[in-house]
Image (cartoon, rainbow, N blue to C red):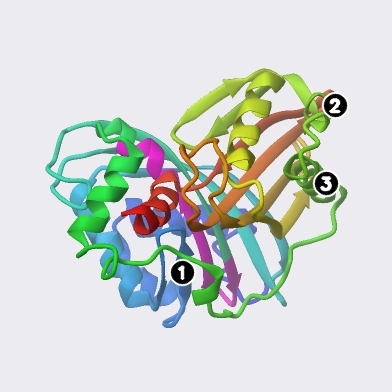
């Protein structure tokens, strides 16, 4: 890999390797090397700039969850070492709530939740990132309801006029990476499926998903069969029926010993004007940052992993309704 350390055999090895080195091996200082100084990191809860903020947030997380492990389930990527590469890295995190912090007093609760991180890397360094953590799964395992957690967070941050504002495209800043992924057929196929679902063509689900599909969804949900997939996507779209759906990044891949896969970063931007996954319509302006991975098999999509942050969506709604 031109421009990268020769201790990494390929790009997935780089992503998996530095993730373990930084977070599990406590090599936080290496962030000064692996992350660019002014990196923008977008998550549903905020946008931050610079490596200092990343290091501080990591220290805070490790104080609250000192035994946290980041188990890389897959790295779906595009690009080249010469022009830069974009990884969509799906992580299964395990941790024990052993310290006081943003989630309250230590409870000793053992957690399991997923994260999808899209990172752009060139010359052995990450310089642009989009990060979605299943906060709904985290707070539920700690005994919170996501809506009540969002209300409590707003109050702790000084009220709706002073609290940290969730990410919205209107506050975004263009980073070093402006690519859109690749044109592999599996990414295009999945993008077409999602566009149809978001256009209310739910008949595409039994056509394109294996009837024995497993869906892994926000809140740590596992749903089975095409009925489960239909229920998840229908409830999300029903909550934001007039919102604009956008495919923001698209990758498809075929790799040895693996099923064809796709990774899509997507968004819904608009009003909370319908009954669905987020209760009574509030009219709040909401941005949903989402990410999905799928694995294809002989009878369609066999596994689907989709993440968005329920607490950040509720925060946007509660900032409107009070």
Q: Is residue 123 magenta?
A: yes
Nearest-to-viewer mark from 2 and 1: 2
Q: N-terminal of the two: label 3 or label 1? A: 1
Return the x and y of residue 222 as percentages of the image width and height.
53, 25
In the drawing, what numbered circle is on residue 41? 1
Q: Is 295 above or below relative to 254?
A: above
| Mark 2 vs 3: CB contact within 8 A | no
- Identify the residue under disc 3: 192
Q: x, y (%) of residue 5?
A: 55, 70
Residue 32 shows up from this direction: yes
Residue highlighted by disc 2: 207
In the picture provided, is 56 more to the left or to the right than 189?
Answer: left
> Is label 2 in contact with label 1 (beta carbons under 8 Å)?
no
Closer mark to the observer between disc 3 and disc 1: 3
Give me the residue at 29% from left, 63% from top.
160
Give the mark nearer the N terminus: 2 vs 3. 3
Residue 186 highlighted magenta (yes or no)? no
Foreground pick, 187 / 272: 272
Between 10 and 39, the one nearer to me in the picture: 39
User: What residue range appears in magenta?
Assistant: 120-139
């Amino acid at each position: 890999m031109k421009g990268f350390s020769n201790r990494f055999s390929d790009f997935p090895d780089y992503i998996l390797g530095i993730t373990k080195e930084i977070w599990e091996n406590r090599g936080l200082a290496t962030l000064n090397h692996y992350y660019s100084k002014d990196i923008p990191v977008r998550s549903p809860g905020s946008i931050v700039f610079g490596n200092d903020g990343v290091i501080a947030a990591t220290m805070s997380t490790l104080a609250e969850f000192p035994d946290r492990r980041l188990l890389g389930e897959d790295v779906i990527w595009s690009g080249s070492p010469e022009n830069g590469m974009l990884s969509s890295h799906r992580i299964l995190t395990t941790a024990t709530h052993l310290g006081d912090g943003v989630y309250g007093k230590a409870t000793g609760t053992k957690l399991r939740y997923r994260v999808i991180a899209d990172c752009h890397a060139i010359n052995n360094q990450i310089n642009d990132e989009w990060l979605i953590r299943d906060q709904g799964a985290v707070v539920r395992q700690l005994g919170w309801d996501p809506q009540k957690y969002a209300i409590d967070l707003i109050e702790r941050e000084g009220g709706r006029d002073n609290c940290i504002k969730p990410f919205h495209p209107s506050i975004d800043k263009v980073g070093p990476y402006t690519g859109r992924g690749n044109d592999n057929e599996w990414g295009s196929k999945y993008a077409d499926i999602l566009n149809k679902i978001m256009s209310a063509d739910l008949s595409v689900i039994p056509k394109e998903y294996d009837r024995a599909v497993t869906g892994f969804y926000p809140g740590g949900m596992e749903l089975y069969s095409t009925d489960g997939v239909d229920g998840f996507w229908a409830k999300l779209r029903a909550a934001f029926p007039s919102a604009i759906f956008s495919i923001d990044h698209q990758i498809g891949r075929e790799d040895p010993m693996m099923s064809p896969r796709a990774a899509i970063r997507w968004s819904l931007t608009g009003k909370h004007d319908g009954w669905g996954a987020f209760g009574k319509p509030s009219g709040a302006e909401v941005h949903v940052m989402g990410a999905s991975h799928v694995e294809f098999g002989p009878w369609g999509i066999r596994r689907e992993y989709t993440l968005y942050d329920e607490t950040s969506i509720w925060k946007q709604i509660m900032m409107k309704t009070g």
